[in-house]
Image (cartoon, helix red, strand yellow):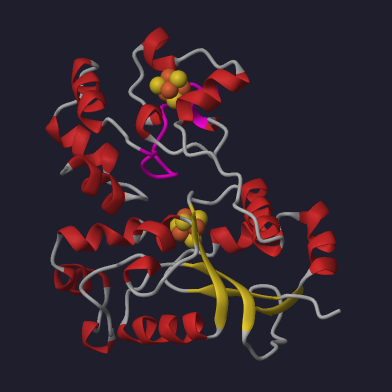
Amino acid sequence: MRKPKLAVWKFASCDGCQLSLLDCEDELLALAGEVEIAYFLEASRATVKGPYDLSLVEGSVTTPHDAERIQKVRRASKKLITIGACATAGGIQALRNFADVNDFLSVVYATPEYVSTLETSTPISAHVAVDFELRGCPINKAQLLEVITAFLHGRKPGIPSTSVCTECKRRGTVCITVAHGTPCLGPVTHAGCGAICPAYNRGCYGCFGPMETPNTASLTKRLRVLGMDDRGVERVFRTFNVTDFEEVRSR
Ligand code: SF4
Ligand code: SF4
C-alpha cells in the first residue's frame, strides 16, 4: 500500500519548529515507517515530486516570492497544517506591521536596495486555506505528533484550547502571580508548553498566542496593579504572537 507523502516547507522563520519534528527522536523512525517523507530540506536534499498528502508549513509570508510560493504549496497539498507562531500569527517579524519597514531596512542593511520585502509579515492563513493551525514558539513536539497522527487517521486533533493556567494546575505549580506578584500572560495564553516558565518562577511570555476567548482587558488591569506602566503592557503583549494579541486586545 502507498504510504502518505509528507512535506515540510519553510517560509520566514528561524527553523525552530522544523527542528521540533527532528527532535522527536524516539518517534521519528516510527513516523518514517508510516509516511514517506517526500520533501523536508532541513533533513534531506533528496526530494520527491508532489502532490503531497500532508504539508507542514513553518514561517510567515514576508516577500513577494513567498506570496507566490505559498500558492504553489497549497495547490500541491491535499491537507495543509501551519506550525508555529510565525506561520499562524506572522511571528515576531510582524513587529514590522506596526512601523515603517523602510526604517528597519535603512538601519539593518548596508545596501537596502538589494532587499525585496513586503511591508508586512502575515500568517499563512491570510494567503491560502489552512486545515489546522498548531501554535507555539516553538511548537510542542508531542502536539505535533498528535496532529500528524490525527490527519493520517482522518480524525480531529486532540489539542486543548484552554489557558496556560490549566497546565500550572495540572503540574501542581503554585501561581507565581498570586504568591509573588509576578506578571504573567498565562491566563490569556493558549495551553501547549506545559507551563514551563511559571514552574521556574518566570511569568508566561505568551509563546502560544491567545487562548480561546481571552480576557485581555481584565489581565491588563491586573498587570497595572502589579506595577506595569503603559509601555510595559505594550511590550509584554508584543512578542512572538504580536498580531494575534493586538487583534484580541482591540476588540
Ligand atoms: S514559531 Fe518560533 S521557533 Fe517556530 S520558526 Fe517561528 S521563531 Fe522559530
Ligand atoms: S503562574 Fe501564570 S499561568 Fe500559572 S496559574 Fe498563575 S497566572 Fe496562570
As drawn, 170 above or below 57 = above
**Quarter location, residue 123:** bottom left
Task: Please indicate, yes or no, whether residue 151 appears anywhere in the rendered image.
Answer: yes
Residue in the picture at 33% in, 36% down:
213
Q: In the rendered structure, does residue 210 fall within the stretch colored magenta?
A: yes
As drawn, 1 above or below 145 = below
Quarter holding the C terminus is top left
The total number of labels drawn is: 0
Residue 98 image position (x, y, % from top left)? 16, 58
Residue lying at the far bottom of the rendered structure: 49
Which sits in the foreground, 155 or 33? 155
For the stretch drawn in magenta, what is the main secondary structure? loop
**Quarter location, residue 205:** top left
Residue 40 image position (x, y, % from top left)? 65, 76
Residue in the picture at 41% in, 71% down:
129
As drawn, 77 above or below 104 = below
